[in-house]
Image (cartoon, rainbow, N blue to C red):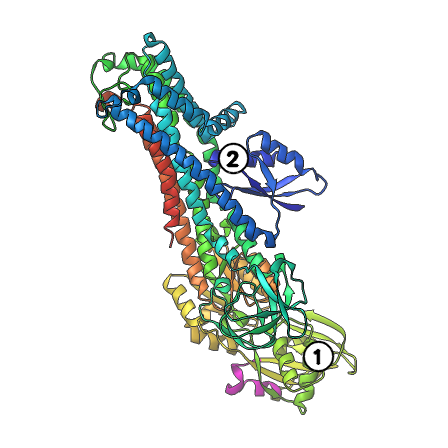
Amino acid sequence: MNSIQLNITGMKCGGCVNTVENILKNSDGVENVSVNLLTESAYFEINAKVPNIDQVLEKLKQSGFPAKIYINDFSKKVNKVQLEKKKKWINQWKQLNFALFLLLFSGLGHLASGGYLNFPILGNLFFHAVLATIALFFPGRKILLKGFKSFLDNRPDMDSLVALGVTSAYITSILSLLFPSTGFPCFFNEPVMLLGFILIGRFLEERAKYQTGASIGELLDLQPEKANIYVEKNKVKSVRVNSLKIGDEIQLLAGDRVPADCIVIEGNSSIDVSHITGESKPINVCSGAHLLNGSLNLNSTLKLKINKVGEETSLAKLVNLIESVQANKPPIQRIADQIAGKFTYFVLLMATSTFFFWWKGAKQIWPDLLIHDHHGLISSSNHTLHNSLGSNAENFLSLAIQLSIAVLVIACPCALGLATPTVITVASGKAAKRGVLFKGGDKIEMASKINNIIFDKTGTLTKGEPFIIDYLNNDDNLFLLKISASLESQSRHPIASALVKEAKKENLNLIPIKSIHTESGRGISGELESIDGVINIGSIDWLETKGVIIDSTAKKTLETEENKSHSVIGVSKNNVLLGFILLGDVLREDSISSVHKLRKENYKINILSGDRKETVIELAQKLGSSETEIKWDLLPEMKLKIIESLKKNDKVAMIGDGINDAPSLAAANLGIAVGSGTQIAKANADVVLMGDKLSGLPYALSLAKKTIRKIKQNIFWAFGYNLIAIPIAAGLLFPKYGILLTPSIAALLMATSSITVVINALSLD
């Protein structure tokens, strides 16, 4: 399966999203479809055996949704995004000016025909007929054509409702103008007002969409356009960043941003990484340090060597991850999209029912209804050009036509379509700025449901940088270190890193490895070239299962108060114990405060560790955890069993950093990886905390709850608006209170509902 991303134009509401999803799902070889209204994109997988993607693009084009394959070129993306944004804004601005122009003349027509303005031509019905015709054939043409095409293709959407409402009002007015004897009302200004408000509403929606996507724009701004590359020993020249290659050496001046992922060759400086990891304090770097693309050099010149460029850099992957977050829908959005897709049929049914009720049924119930004077919801003048629909109807057929048009105008599935993606995009952007990466909107929804949090110990609550404290039960400490570091030199485990680091400090030459075998969470065994026999390095219990004899004296040495709180590994050769190595680790600076915050929010806290009992208990005491909340001496499969057991009653989040945590991260309801951990841990996690701090965890869970709360508010508003507005437009309050809506007010309310949903999303903090 190949992953495909499409950029799609023409989607305006949840009904459009539903239509596009159905087209893709019904295409041969297409699976796992996700369509996003806010970013106007679709993500799906296609079977490599069905390579003709052109057929899919043609189907979308024929249905009114032109699409093109997204080219994932990070070096071009920076400029391309800015150019497309500028072009779209210019088009939107032109449409907005045209809409305001039409609304101005329509408003002047109100004043002139009401006798408040001495320009008779502005109040003339023929003038308004021309104005309405211009509105339909120019700014409204695309909306009407797409709406009728969708309607004829049996997939009506928001544009279909607008097209039916506008053309109904226009045709009725034309008939009234040409054939006054029909008794139909004449309201040419209503198509003008309707299209005007819709264009204004869509302009404001587009503006809000760009604001919600600002996090990606801000990240793209971190990518510099040029870099200084060394052409000779001490000479540099300026080149475009997209021409850089792996291995190039560049000069980074104070105030410049890092153009790619690099390694420091020469120099010392302070680096601001706040936009990448959320770490507010600058970090100090020297030779050998790794710098992330987009980081800011604060005070000294550095010489760097490039090790990753383009799409492989950390900044590019961060941008791609945020884009994918916006594509993955939470279950709550899938429900909203399905409802929005069916909503248009409901509105058409309501409009049809309204027509037949007022034409055939109402005169049986209220035979004298049209004799009495009534008023509009918004006060209107007494001239016939701008009255509320139905207020001057002379017969029930005329009333039925006008009220059915009002129902078509007032309905709005746009708000339903925007209710979720706007909030998800705002939330993912805010989280990214704080160094928290959610891998999808569905992960945000799951994070909002978590009530039980499981921490790994080493590398999660602690910094994962163990250091050697002491050696026990051996005669030659350097030899013990040398063979241990040699065998562990190919491992990514934190203890292996500590051994290799200490060996380098002692200037020991490591011995080449002949064979190696790792048992995750227990130990490592193998052979070294110049050493006879099998070397085993691991926990005491594991060594004993290998036949290594550990006498009671050695065990008592480990059980002294001084040694109890340290991690211990044993080293043996040919089943003969060579000695023990004691290691310590440092608690992360914000571990205690982060755990306390989570407890205040009523989260259950558990600590699962492969370390020995005394070490884990000492850590638990610092964190204020009881013995019932901690487990020790655990293998990866044992952690899995505990997680599966807890999942029966709770929604469980697992936070880890190492290779042996990957199965647990995948098994938990929500897997959270620490950014300083291994790649496999981050790949299996649903959420990644960038940098090396846990403070992002309470923020991430709190933000997730606020996000889902906002989504529910938006969906409630979208439903509530339609539940209230449609019955009023259908004339529910007309018989008793004489309240009716003008189509222009209906259009204003319709646009307001969408804008309200977007503004509510933007208010997420």
Of badges 1 and 2, the one in the foreground is: 2
Kind of residue at badge 1: Ser
Residue 397 shows in this picture: yes
Label drawn at residue 12 = none
| Residue 265 or residue 424, whichever sits in front | 265
Q: Is residue 739 left or right of residue 57?
A: left
Name the residue at 48% across, 43% down.
38
Please, is residue 134 above or below residue 569 in the view? above
* Residue at the extreme top of the image, as rendered: 181
- Report the residue marked by disc 1: 486
| Structural crowding at the residue carrying mark 2, measured as other residues with C-alpha within 10 Å and reported as few (<14), some (14–19) or many (≥20) | many
| Residue 461 or residue 343, whichever sits in front | 343
**CA separation, marks 1 and 2?**
61 Å
Q: Is residue 284 left or right of residue 680?
A: left
Q: Secondary structure at mark 2?
A: loop
Please, is residue 637 above or below residue 479 in the view? above
Circles 1 and 2 in contact, beta carbons < 8 Å: no
Span shown in magenta: 554-567
Please, is residue 555 above or below residue 730 in the view? below
- Percent of width and height locating residue 307: 65, 66
Label drawn at residue 10 = 2
Name the residue at 31% across, 30% down.
745
Quarter of the figure with residue 731? top left
